[in-house]
Structure formats: C-alpha cells, structure tokens
Amino acid sequence: MFGPVWTTLYLLIAVAAVIVWRSPAGSRRRTAIFVFVAQRVANAGWSWLFFGARQGGLALPELALLWLLVAASVAAFWRIRPLAGGLLLPLLGWVSFAGVSNFSLWQRNPLLLG
C-alpha cells in the first residue's frame, strides 16, 4: 500500500509545487514555498523519528507539526492557485492517517517504539 500511495502523493506534491513555483504571485509565492519546504523538512524529521530512531512518542508532536505545516501549505498554495492547494489535500489526509497509525502503533508496541 505504501509504494503506490507515496508514488501518487509525491507526483501530486511535485505538480502542486511546480504550479506555485511558476506563478507570478511574488511575496505570496515566496511564503508558500517557504512553508512548503518547512513541511518537507518536517516530513523527513517524522520519518526519521518514527522509522529510524523508533521513537513513536517523540514522533507524535513532530507529526502534529507536520500536519499543521501541510495544512498551512494547502492554504498558501490555494491562495495562489486553488488547483495547487487541492493537489495537497490527499497529503493532508495521509498525514492524518499516519497520525492515527503512529499513535496506535506506539501504544501497542511501547518497547519497540519508545
């Protein structure tokens, strides 16, 4: 399930980013790209905490930050071009699913996921 989902998500993320990157929105574009880059960094941080360090408890607040940054990216992209914001909505859904999964796995496997 993860392979096809992430392939699709990254395709949607890339298309959304290109749409915003090519827009003539000036300072709104810079802000949107900054928030977008921040959420990509937060995504890498969560992946490392959960999968690499196996720290399910520490990964939860990181995931909350990631969710907020994805939501902010959706809003910022939407202001520039609604299509670009809409393309990020599946990512927001997936991060929400990851949050529920993160919490459940952490609660059920405290010795494995710190």
Image (cartoon, rainbow, N blue to C red):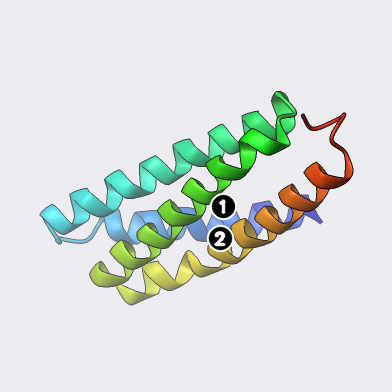
Who's the residue at 73% across and 32% down the image?
Answer: 51
Q: Position of residue 1 (x, y in %)?
A: 82, 56
**Cα–Cα gap, marks 2 and 1:** 9 Å
Q: Is residue 95 left or right of residue 18?
A: right
Question: 18 or 2: which is nearer to us?
Answer: 2
Q: Which residue is mark 1?
A: 10
Who's the residue at 68% across and 54% down the image?
Answer: 98
Residue 95 in which image quadrant: bottom right
Circle 1 — which element?
Answer: helix
Label 2 or label 1, whichever lies nearer to me, is 2
Residue 17 in which image quadrant: bottom left
Q: Position of residue 111 (x, y in %)?
A: 87, 29
Q: Is residue 61 left or right of residue 1?
A: left
Question: 100 or 77: which is nearer to us?
Answer: 100
What amino acid is at disc 1? Answer: Tyr
Q: Which residue is mark 2?
A: 91
Q: Position of residue 53 (x, y in %)?
A: 70, 23
What amino acid is at disc 2? Answer: Leu
Kindly identify which numbered label has been placed on residue 54: none
Who's the residue at 38% across and 67% down the image?
Answer: 84
Rendered position, 74 above or below 39: below
